[in-house]
Structure formats: C-alpha cells, structure tokens
Amino acid sequence: MAKPLILVTNDDGITAPGLRALVNYMKELGDVVVVAPDSPQSGMGHAITLDNTLYSQKMQVDFDNGAIEEYSCSGTPADCVKLALQELLERKPDICVSGINHGSNSSINVIYSGTMSAAIEAGIEGVPAIGFSLCDYSWEANFAPCGPYIQKIVRESLENGIPNGVVLNVNVPKTEDNGINGIKVCRQARANWKEKFDKRTNPMGKDYYWLTGEFELLDHGEDTDEWALSQGYISLVPTQFDLTAYHAIQQLNTWDL
C-alpha cells in the first residue's frame, strides 16, 4: 500500500525549528511534503492574499530531514494550504499537520492563530487536519519530549479518521524535569486578553503603538485545555469551523423580524 501523504505547514516560517521537528516526526509515518510561509506569519489568523501576487519556490531546507518536496510561499498560512491543494500536490493529502508552533494556541488564542488557520483551511477542503503548538515561545525550544505524542495523535487520526467538520487543536505544555503526563481531550477554556497599547513617538515625531496585554483566564473548570496544560498534560480540543451558534437560533426566532 502507498504511504500516507502528509502535508506539513506552519505560521512561523519554513525554516522554523518547530516545523523542522514536525517534518522529522512525520517522515516515520508517511511521505512528507512541506508548503510553508517564507517568513513568519504569526497572528495572521485566517487571512488570505487577494490584492498581491503569490510566489512559491521549490527548495530544500534540510536535505536529511525527510521531506520528499518542500515549497516556500510568500503568502499566509491559509494561502499555503490553498496553494498546496490546488497547485502543488499531485494528489489530495491524507492529512495536514500544522506547526509545531512556537507558543500556545490554547483557549482564545485559537482565534488569532495562523497555525490553526492553516489546519482549518485544510479541514474546510475535506482534508483531516491537526494544529500542534508547544507552550514555549523560544526559538531554541525543546521539541523532543512531544515527538512520540505527536506521532501517536497523527497515527490515531490516520487509522480512525477525524470527524467531519472537525480540526484538532493540540497544545503541548512546556516541560522541565517531570515530562508529559499524557493526553487529555478537552474543551476550549473561556478566556480573553486584557489588552492595552504602548504608545511611543518615533524620531520624526510620529506616534506608533505596540500591542501588549495579559492573558485573563475566566474558566477554572477541570475539563479545559488550560487546566490540562497546567497539570502537565497535552490538551486536544476538537475545533469546528462552523461558527453557527445553534443554541441561539430559537431565541432569535422570537424576535419581531
């Protein structure tokens, strides 16, 4: 039987250590093709390129890493997946994995995540998809402890399938000496960012702003991704891209519309 075709992408850029680690883990499970941004695209969400041209270049970042083909793309993570599925791949991939992101995409962060938007774009196109993130923003983050767990999740997904309309959001805790305690299937914790702007003035007298803020957890349930991560577990949240609030339909139908 043919090996599974695995599309690997991310939002940190094609040379990011997290993506290189993910390619290394995936080469043991199937044939890997990389289509990833040529520069960092963190926080881009599901943006797509409409008014500019897109460029793609076939390249080989790491000759012994295991990918059979690699392409850099000038666009966003969602652009990378669109281009891969419509132009670059000879057949539909069996799964798309995005990451490993340098930093958390748990809770409300999933809304802003380019990592997850790439996975969601694949899911929209009917490709089983998973976004992987490590809760460590360092470029020198240690991805080794999460390798066997990532392989296990992808292997289970290939064997059992991911439910239609669902994309998996997987976050891995930053571990020290205690290691990872296992995997928990969770719900997304309710939280937001308490944001503010740091206003400054450049030498030309023009004001500019840096967005800053603090993560505010509003949900202390023991079935959430934030709780699992705090206890040393990998969180796995089934995420849907149908944003309909079905529970509100009945109430809205009582309005005089």
Image (cartoon, rainbow, N blue to C red):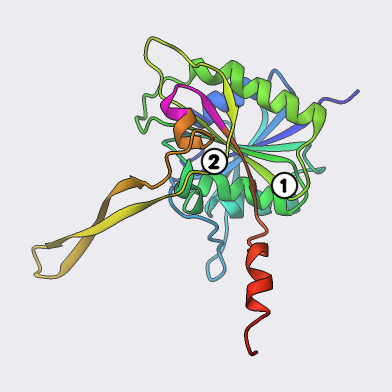
Residue that badge 1 annotates: 88
How many other residues sit within 10 Å of disc 1, few (<14), some (14-19) or many (≥20)?
some
Q: Amino acid at mark 2?
A: Asn
Q: Position of residue 167 (x, y in %)?
A: 67, 44
In this rendering, is residue 140 above or below 178? below
Q: Position of residue 72 (x, y in %)?
A: 56, 43
Q: Residue at x 41, y 36 (%)?
A: 103
Between 138 and 91, the one lying in front of the other is: 138
Residue that badge 2 annotates: 10
Between 72 and 217, the one lying in front of the other is: 217
Q: Which residues are magenta?
A: 229-235
Q: Position of residue 10 (x, y in %)?
A: 54, 41
**Does dot 2 land on a helix, a strand or a loop?**
loop
Between 136 and 179, the one lying in front of the other is: 179
Residue 24, label in figure: none
Q: Residue at x 52, y 52 (%)?
A: 74
> If the image is split into quadrants, where does the C terminus sit?
bottom right
